[in-house]
Amino acid sequence: MSSSTHSHKRKNSHLFPQRKSSNSSMDNPFFLDSNNATNTDSQVNENEYTIDEGRPTDATIDVTDGPQTPFLQERYSMTPRPESFEFDDVENQGRMQSFFSVDSFNRRWGEWSLPEKRSYVLVFTLIALLVLFLMVILKPTKFLSNRTTPAETSPENPSSSKRSFSIENVLDGDFVIPENTFHFINPPQILLSQDLDPGLFFTTKEIDGQTHFIAKQLFDETFEVNLGGNRFLYQGAEFTVSSVQINYELDKLILGTNLEPEFRHSSKGYYWVKDLSTGAIEPILPPEESNDDNEFGLVKLSYAHFSPAYKYIYFVYESNLFLQSVSARYAKKLTEDGSEEVFNAKPDWIYEEEVLASDKAIWWAPDDSKAVFARFNDTNVDDIQLNHYTDMDEPYLSNSRIKYPKPGFQNPKFDLFLINLQNGIIYSINADCQNDSILYNAKWISPDAFRFEVTDRNSKILDVKVYDIQSAKLLTVRTTDSNLYKGWIEKTKDVLSIPPKPESKRTEYGYIDIHTDIAGFNHLFYYPSILAKDGIQLTKGNWEVTGNGIIGYEYETDTVFFTANKIGVMSQHLYSTSFADPTSQGKLQCLQNPSDKHDFYDFELSSSARYAVSKKLGPDTPVKVAGLLTEVLNVADTHDDSIVQLTIDEKLKETIKNYDLPITNYNSMVLNDGIEINYIEIKPANVDPKKKYPILVNIYGGPGSQTFTTKWSLAFEQSVVSGLDAIVLQIEPRGTGGKGWNFRSWARGKLGYWEPRDIIEVTKKFIQTNRPHIDENKVAIWGWSYGGFTSLKTVELDNGETFKYAMAVAPVTNWTLYDSIYTERYMNQPSENQEGYLDISTIKNYKSFESLRRLFVMHGTSDDNVHIQNTFRFVDQLNLLGLTNYDMHIFPDSDHSIRHHNAQRIVFQKLYYWLKDAFDGHFDNMKILHL
């Protein structure tokens, strides 16, 4: 890595990009928000940054595929640091018993001599008299604990000490950690020298009561350009900016207003171009298109973005692609067949949700000379209907329809088209694949080579294809058969293009990919040419490249930066390796202290990798800083004034002084068949050895997912521990990610088989180890989406032996009802795996739910992901059996995140207080009625 430091000041700093001082450059769309969200997909233009109030009740959905669990906020879906006292660790039973066990004390008492016993009695008597004296004199309100009840901390008793917190504290935002806005503005092409990188970024500043966008540099702290405010007038009406994109010259902006969310990644809204030289703001419109219902003649676009080199603006309207020069006022329509069934440069529902994780399906050459876009044809795809109930102005129900393929039914077909901006012609690319093939990752490796990946319908065989522009040939350069490691093809991470380097005798473009090695772990491979069949493995070992994968690249030293869980499966650190010297291949450098095994870091690097945003997300409270990469590797050491502090945590630090925060331990347990399962234990700060504690098991468990890490958190589970005085276990069953294919492949063909078995065994062993201190009649389980499915499957198998209560939010109950690409990736098609679908993965032993004391199910009626059909079918079967030991809450017009009309606050309040009733025994006397 370069040895540049902050003291290295270039004398020719006038060459750094100033306003209107450089050529147009690489697209850098941003969503600007108070959470300072980062681009999690390295495909340029993949994300914008929105202006958001950072409300603590908003859900954020994991971008991994499949049904997901919305958390309150990612910034508190993280975990507190472990303390020395291990409540549940099997290996520490002796130490636990020495603290808790009366039997162990009696054994020691019997071994003592008479003088020892007399001394002990005398000392104990003196201590007891002293304590009694202090109790009389000082009159303390508590003896064993300084925690207080909600009644004692009421407004009528403001002087009392409030040491526990509830879900209301979480929902009211007491534990929110605001951050200053910071986003790098990317140059037109990768910077080959760190000396050319000024660390250009934008932030926001309040000026005269309005938010302004400010461009700054990390190199020159005096550099500052005001790009204007977030409100503007158009034809006498005021518009407020929701998203902003800034070009590298700092003379053009794309603004988004009135954005309406569509699905997980997509939205529709008005888009505008702002010319900073004149201050003029004009709407981006299709030619000769206007909305008669809008008095300003505006139309809502699916998106609008700069091309990578900022020469063009491209956008999608009504599923057609449009293009205009950045200096032109009018756009050209490039496609004509867009409709509700044909999508150009925009994914349909299933590709957005399960494959591309984006609202765009277009990939630009880095020099703006060409682009490839996909067209998805859903003509033969069946649709689902979502009714809408809360429109008070409509006497009849309105509805929307979504093309949604289910297992065994027709999938969308895709085609690829090349736009050659040099001659103005659009070409069809013959992808040379079956009609039911799936398009995965795509990327321009060079200005003339487009690389993409295609799998069979079941996502088992992957072909890497390269379309060479010069020869107009399509070549399959590599094939991966996941059947060899009993796996499947997951959504792949972005590849890193490696440019030629004449001084190192590297004359061709190459790339670095992340895929499975012979041992079954995801690692880095260097392909020295675009058509190379075999890659050079750069990393290896029983660990995996995690997070966003490749974080950055330093051209001068051919150093690659990436995140991995080498130190601990639940943690994450930044690593570097170089592919320049064959003798150094495979040599890694951990850029944080490897002794801090529980640390969880994430990074965002500037184009040259000179500067970085460093995010330490756990196990302590999160800290986010920006500066030279060499100076922000360890956030605890960032005391230099040149470091930009982004985390605003003063209020949080003062707030948490009022509470005894839960204690978190990161553990593992070896099951009876030798499989090691990782789990997190969260327990009250002040454990009472005389008390029996209820347990809540929190589960997701989706194949290939990694839900529970060492990130810091004060969210729903922590409020249960603190406010309900309970213990929470978060379990990662076999089939989940981060531990190689030997662990992950257990899920293949039998979703819902191993997850409940692992959960039950871990929970039972935990209870057995800590039996004197666990209330076995108050053990509950809960999950959302796949976690809801896993919770119900666990209850079905357990039959009331371990779990007495369950809460399932938006659960899958039958995998024939879920989408095809996700489900078939693991299960194949129903005709190929009838046993897996019907006998293993479907919830069908409904009578087992009779053994529960109480069940709680929640779902939104407009859930486009896990349709409410799943819950209605499940509850209908309970009704047929005459079971009444369940509660159900339906949220009209809420989608999978359940937010509509204040719904998400209610979701977590319902979960919390329902669980409180369960742990307080309020459901114990309710009888199951048999009709």
Image: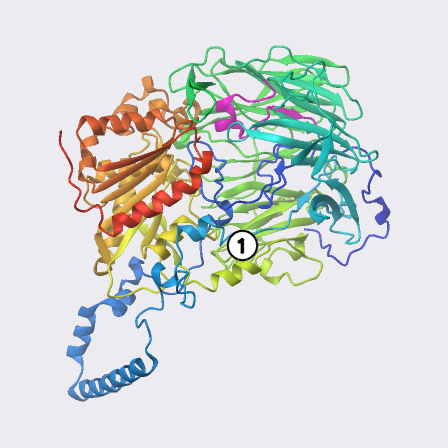
Q: Which residues are magenta?
A: 344-366
Q: Nearer the viewer, residue 757 or 207?
A: 207
Kind of residue at disc 1: Pro
Horizontally, is 392 left or right of 414 in the view? left
> Measuring 42% from the left and 17% from the top, which residue is drawn there?
396
Instruction: Please state the horizontal and vertical placement of residue 690, each as a whole percent of the image.
Output: 24, 65
- Secondary structure, mark 1, is loop
Q: Residue at x 48, y 64 (%)?
A: 657
- Residue 691 at least partly seen: yes
Q: Which residue: 43% across, 65% down?
A: 158
Is 28 above or below relative to 435? below
Q: In terms of depth relative to the viewer, which is nearer, 179 or 885?
A: 885
In the image, residue 688 above or below residue 795: below
Residue 138 in picture, x, y percent from top left: 34, 80
* Horizontal side, residue 101 vs residue 76: left or right: left
Q: Identify the residue at image location x=37%, y=23%.
A: 828
Q: Position of residue 448 (x, y in %)?
A: 70, 23
Per the image, the residue denoted by label 1 is 622
In the rendered structure, does residue 364 fall within the stretch colored magenta? Answer: yes
Residue 392: percent from left, percent from top: 45, 25
